[in-house]
Amino acid sequence: MIFRETPLPGAWVLEPERFADERGFFARTFCRRDFAARGLETAVDQCSVSYNHRRGTLRGLHFQIAPHEEVKLVRVNRGVLWDVIVDLRPGSPTLRKHFAIVLSADLGNQLYIPKGMAHGFQTLEDGTEVFYQISEPYAPEAARGYRWDDPAFAIPWPEPATVISEKDRSLPFFSADSSQPPAQGPHPPAPSPAPSQPPSPGEGERRPETSSGCSPSSPGEGGWEGAGEEGRGDEGLREEAR
C-alpha cells in the first residue's frame, strides 16, 4: 500500500499496490504492521456497508464523542463518491478545515479518518456502495453531527443534495452547538496548500481529472480538496512510504 499524508494531520489517503496478471490483480487493503509502523489505529471493532441508490445522495457530517470516538477507514466497493472530513479537534491548527477526495471502486483508494473528525460523502454514481472499517462500536448516545451546508466549514459539495435524510437535515450548525467536540492531543502543523483551486465536476461526469494542487476552498473558512489525474485525488498529498 502507498500511504499519503493529507493536509489535515492524522488523516491519510491509502492507495493500493496492485499485482496484476492475466487473471486480474491482487492488492492489500489493510495491513496491521504497516498501520502500526505509522502510529495508526490497528483495531477493527466493526465493519459496515452503506448502499446508496442514487447519484447525489449526501450523508453527514457524522462523528462520535468521547469516550466513543471512532477511527474509520473508508473505501468504495462499487461506484464513485466525493468523501469529505472536517477537523473538529480543539487546538488543532486545521480546526474547522476540511479535506475532500474522490474515492472509487476503480481506483481502490481509501481514506483513513482519525478521531476528532466529522465525516460525510456525496455519491457521484447511482448504486454506490461504501465500506467502513471502524475502531469502535456504534454508540447511539455518543452519535453527533453537523449540517453538511454549515458556513463554518464552507464545503463546496460537487452537486446538489438530491437525496438526504431528514435526520441529517436536522443536524445543528457548528456555531449553535454548545457542546465540546472530541478532544485530541497536540498536532503538528499542516502542510501549506498549493495556490490553485480544483475545478468542480460537470453534469453527468466524474470529478475532473486535471486539477493541480490541494488548495484552500472558497467561500469562507474552507479546507482542502484533491481531485487529480484520473480522479486519483492525490494533489497536496505527500507520499510517505510504500
Image: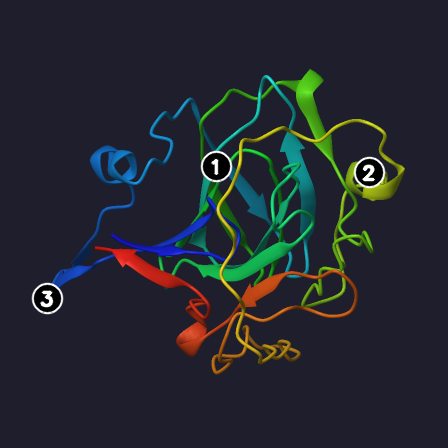
Q: Looking at the image, which is closer to me, 140 or 199?
A: 199
Few, some or many residues within 10 Å of mark 3 (<14, 14–19, 20+): few
Point out the tag, 2 or 3, that comes first from the N-terminus. 3
Which element carries disc 2, helix, strand or loop? loop
Point out the tag, 1 or 3, that comes first from the N-terminus. 3
Q: Residue at x 14, y 63 (%)?
A: 20
Q: In this rendering, is residue 159 above or below 34?
A: below
Q: Quadrant of residue 21?
A: bottom left
Residue 74 left/right relative to 15: right
Q: CA distance from mark 2 to mark 3?
A: 49 Å
Where is mark 3, residue-wise?
22
Residue 122 left/right relative to 43: right
Q: Looking at the image, which is closer to me, 148 or 165?
A: 148
Q: Looking at the image, which is closer to me, 53 or 174?
A: 174
Q: CA distance from mark 1 to mark 2?
A: 21 Å
Which disc number belongs to residue 171?
2
Few, some or many residues within 10 Å of mark 2 (<14, 14–19, 20+): some
Q: Quadrant of residue 87?
A: top right
Q: In this rendering, is residue 70 above or below 125?
A: above
Question: Percent position (x, y) of residue 2?
Answer: 27, 56
Number of callouts: 3
Where is mark 1, residue-wise?
72
Q: Residue at x 65, y 54 (%)?
A: 97
Which element carries disc 1, helix, strand or loop? strand
